[in-house]
Image (tube, grey):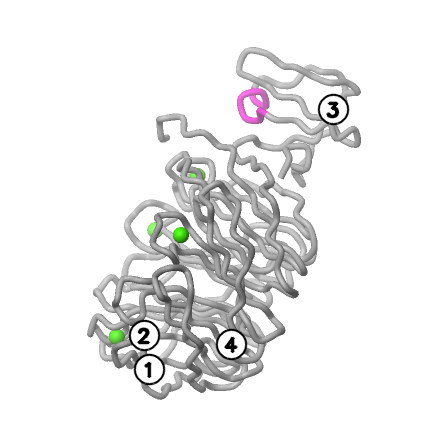
Amino acid sequence: MRADECMDTQAVTMSGNELPAALLRRWRVLDLHRTKRVCFISRFALIVLAPIQYSLCMASVSFTNAPPLVVSDDAHAVVASDLDNDGVPDLVIAYGIDSHVSVFIGHGDGTFVPRVDYATGQAPIAAALADLDGNGSVDVAVTNVYGNSVSILMGQGDGTFLPAVDYPVDAFPSAIAIGDLNGDNIPDVVVACGSSVAVLLGTGGGAYAPFTAIPLTSPWNSVAVVDVTKDGIPDIIVVESVSAGTVSVVRGRGDGTFETAEAYPTGASPDFLVVGDFNRDGTEDLAVANSYDDSISVLIGAGDGTFLPQVPYAVGTYPWSISAADFDRDGHVDLAVTNAGAGTASFLTGKGDGTFDSQIVFMLEGNPETAVAIDLNGDGSVDFVAPTVGSTVVLLNDVVFSGTFD
Ligand SMILES: [Ca+2]
Ligand SMILES: [Ca+2]
Ligand SMILES: [Ca+2]
Ligand SMILES: [Ca+2]
């Protein structure tokens, strides 16, 4: 993304070229509204390309476009890991239609080998990556939203995969996560289905037992496996969007079974959740994208497995996903939201106390759905990959580490 595509919905229009000192300290890049020309402010000098009408954006995050990934159709989700054991992140793209996933092996500079497709069940809408059979190479698990199944593709360690093995789950599986739920050191698979969460316990060698179902109202589009109770046992977190408008925490018992869900209100139609420690207290916190009211909800973990009431932040139209990472390299977790209805991404820089600055909006293209934040080119700055219909935007982070944290 070019800096001149950077917008701030709290844009300030000014006349003349005298900017308040506070703004000079805070904003370093200006987009000259309508002219698409950009000026840069240093601490000591302001260089302006007239005419003077400013749309300000914080320079704390800025990106450069790498070549987009050529995908086959409606790319819905992207996940990243090192699939060929060369130390460079690779990508797997999942689709809301079709019956395959695409594997992109990274060159290490933000570019990728052209995709290789692998057959799955119908509409593999979400994917998760982990070493499922414990042989040191990353495997792929996808959830087939119209196939009502999970496809497991075992990695060969060289970036190629064996043909998929399918396991049935409940109807409309839309999200998938992996974690060891029963403490046997074998990764288990958790799938958010239309009215339940399906748990598939690993039996070893990348094989899975028939699923058991945790009844829920309407888990959809996002699920996480994380130990929010800090008892060493993974818990399951899902958003429930259709009628509830909640994020629900299902506490694990450690044997692959779970307590009754505890629900926390969010905004309207929460469609995605991400986990991170936003206030640096050692307890996981939650951020939820509310697709119907163009907001995200931040819920700070209380430390005992419960969460404080949501704090909403405005983002773009129809926010679809959230990624949590330190994009501006100040030591605080930031949030990146893909706004599917607006064709934009909103970045909210974290203050380190669990609160966030107002959004900085970057133009993408198409309708970005889920995204991944990972350092693609090994410069230590977290990059951003966002699939859209027919393409996938790759944004390389321009931030250079200052050597200090707040
Ligand atoms: Ca690799
Ligand atoms: Ca296990
Ligand atoms: Ca926390
Ligand atoms: Ca940060």
Label 1 – label 4 distance at C-alpha = 17 Å
Contact, mark 2 vs mark 1 (Cβ under 8 Å): yes
Figure check: 93 above or below 144: above
Residue 99 rendering spot, x and y as whole percentages: 57, 76
Front label number (2 vs 1): 1
Residue 350 rendering spot, x and y as whole percentages: 45, 41
- Residue type (three-letter) at the residue carrying disc 2: Asp
Contact, mark 3 vs mark 2 (Cβ under 8 Å): no
Front label number (3 vs 2): 2
Residue 226 rendering spot, x and y as whole percentages: 33, 64
Q: Which residue is mark 1?
A: 208
Residue 362 visible to an observer of this rendering: yes
Q: Which residue is mark 4?
A: 120
Mark sitting earlier along the chain (1/4): 4
- Secondary-structure class at tag 3: loop
Nearer to me, 218 or 164: 164
Front label number (2 vs 4): 4
The quarter of the picture where residue 17 lies is: top right
Contact, mark 1 vs mark 4 (Cβ under 8 Å): no
Side of 67 where 224 appears, left or right? left
Q: Residues within 10 Å of mark 3 (few under 14, many from 20)?
A: few
Figure check: 397 above or below 286: above
- The residue positioned 34% from the left and 54% from the top of the image is 85
Front label number (1 vs 4): 4
- Residue type (three-letter) at the residue carrying disc 4: Thr
Mark sitting earlier along the chain (2/1): 2
Label 3 – label 2 distance at C-alpha = 56 Å
Mark sitting earlier along the chain (1/3): 3
Which quarter of the figure is the C terminus placed in?
A: top left
Label 2 – label 4 distance at C-alpha = 19 Å
Label 1 – label 3 distance at C-alpha = 62 Å
